Structure formats: structure tokens, C-alpha cells
Image: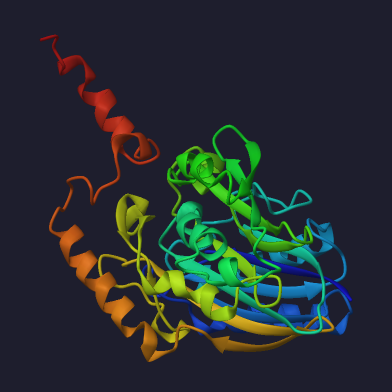
Amino acid sequence: MKVTLSVIKADVGGWVGHCSMHPDLIAAGDSALAKAKKAGLIIDYHVTRCGDDLQFIMTHTNGTDNREIHELAWNTFKTCTGIAKKLKLHGAGQDLLADAFSGNVKGQGPGVAEMDIDEREAEPVVIFMADKTASGAWNLPLYHIFSDPFNTIGLVISSNMHKGFLFEVHDVKESKKIIFKCPEETYDMLVFIGAPSRYTVKAVYSRETGEIAASSSTQKLSLIAGRYVGKDDPVCIVRAQGIFPAVGEVLEPFARPHIVEGWMRGSHNGPLMPVAVKESNPTRFDGPPRVIAAGFQLAEGRLVGPVDMFDDPAFNNARQAALNMADMLRRHGPFEPHRLPLEEMEYTTMPQVMQKLRRRFEKI
């Protein structure tokens, strides 16, 4: 069965501050998507949140970039924004950068990851959702999942994965893309995806069959708005088992926390900490950045799940490691490498400060 899996998210109001999601917003989202399911627009759905971001996971048969599906998400986010304003929640509607829907939520603020798939006999998918970080946060995990044999032993011993994978990488500043063939072009690819603030892995495909294996959101809010309006808080869909890495291989990169940009005011580097949904309430310095994972089996478009994949003591050491990394970075305060480098601060107050003081700089 041909199914489209769409994950669309937006920050429509934080409770309290930027740390969590008021239950009324989740209830409103659930109500709207339930009506859409009853009307036949979508097959199934799941509403959840990561930190202060509202997440819509939907299955349907309308294909990617479908106007009706995107308009459903947009209108529901607008309804939730109205509730957020009545509750005086923080940053109500901050991810909705346009006044009206224009046919697609891409470029209007919300983050989007979608894929069209032919359901296999067994179709497990893991949906990653992050808060207080940027779209490039998936670069390192996706590299490990689909190109690192020390993480994914299937690349070595599974005949249907041995050919490797294709990586679609986007230059988000120049709006260009390139396809890398891995493993033979791995080193070339790392030159680019090692700079995740500009180059992001948009999708991954099996070289065995050409089927899509992963899809991520690459929207950068600051580039869309031309100013700082909050971090991108990306989402990512990964298919598992069979011709794709096993579920355990998909999750394994997050057992080794890595540093991502975001955290307080979107202007700091911090560790991406894997947590259960109930623990995705970034409070310490509005962080550290969090990632949750919802696991589903697809059955004729029905979302069987979710399983809260990081609600597992096996990730306790990863959480502790992330906290230790957070302690070390916080000691730096406004100094790099905790604060982002100047070229990544162009959408904060930094340009105004530089403009104010520029006449006071003298030649040496």
C-alpha cells in the first residue's frame, strides 16, 4: 500500500516560558486531526510534543507537499495559537511567520519531514523530534546510522545493505542540493555535513532499491524571517529493518551525545540529550537541547504505537554524559565555544551592537 507519512511541527506557545506544552494545545490539535480522520483526509495521526513544540504525525494517501494536508496543519496551528494567546503563553505563534496560508507550510515557519512509501510486510519507523536545536542536528546521527559500520553492523554483514546509501544534502543558505554515494564518497560528504549550520542531510535512500530511508526537516527560521525568531527544532523520519538499519542501529548514535547549536536564545552550543517524552521539558538555561523518539509500526497507514523509544534505562549513561557536557560548556558563559561563533550570531542582537560601536574601532 502506498502511504505518505507527514510530520509537521511548530512552536505555537510555551508553558512556562520555553519549556513545555500546555495540555489544551495538545487537546486542540488532537480534536482537529480527529475530525480530519473522520472526514477521510488522513488515515491516522498522533499528536505529541517535544519541549514547547507541537508535533503532528499523520498518514494519508495524498503525497508529499499536499496542499490539503499542509493547510490542515497550518489552520490547526493557528487555532492553537489563539488558545495560547488567551492563556498568555510565551511566544504564542512564534513559528507562524506568515499571516495567511500560501499553499504549503514550507517557508512559512513550521518544520516538515515527509516521505512516500510502499508499505512492506513489516514497516517499523522511528520519528525523532528535537527541541532547542537546529536542523543540522541530524547530520551526525544520520551519518552514523547509514554510513558508519562501527554503529551499524548491517553495513558489513547484511547483503541488502552492503551497497550503502545515497545522501541528499542541502545547502540551506544557497538553496542547492547534492547527492553523495556512500561509502565511496563518504569523505567528500563529511567535508560538507561536518558544517551543519549550512549543510544538512535532507534525505537518505537505499542503493539496493532506491527506496527512501530517512527524511528530515531542513527549514531554518532565521533565514526565512531574516531575524532571530527561535531555533528550528527539527524532526526526522527513519525507516528500520530489512533493507534499512535495525531499530537498535537507528537509536545507537544517541547513546553518544553530540554537540548541537541552539540552547538558550538559539545562540549556544550544547549536548543533544535523548529523553522520554515526559522528560522533554528543557528548563536549565532553557536546555540542554532534547531529542525524543516515537516508534511505530505502519499497518495499511495505521500508526500502531507509539513506543517511547528513549524511555529506557539503557540511555541513562547518555543522559549523564550530556549533563556532564552541559556543565563544562556552561562554565564558558558568553565565551565561545559555548556561545556560537560570530558568523552564526548574525540574526541576534550582535549586528546592532557592532553597528553602534563601529565608529569607535580604530586602525592599529
Q: Position of residue 134 (x, y in %)?
A: 46, 54
Identify which residue, 177 or 43, lies in the foreground: 177
Q: Residue at x 62, y 52 (%)?
A: 202
Identify which residue, 17 or 222, lies in the foreground: 222
The extreme top residue here reads 363
Instruction: Identify the image quadrant of the N terminus.
Output: bottom right
Q: Position of residue 31 (x, y in %)?
A: 70, 83
Residue 272 vs residue 65: left or right? Answer: left
Identify which residue, 359 or 85, lies in the foreground: 359
Residue 313 vs residue 91: left or right? Answer: left
Instruction: Identify the image quadrant of the C terminus.
Output: top left
Q: Position of residue 119 (x, y in %)?
A: 82, 76
Q: Position of residue 275 (x, y in %)?
A: 41, 79
Q: Residue at x 32, y 31 (%)?
A: 351
- Please indicate, yes or no, whether residue 88 appears anywhere in the rendered image: no
Q: Residue at x 41, y 78 (%)?
A: 280
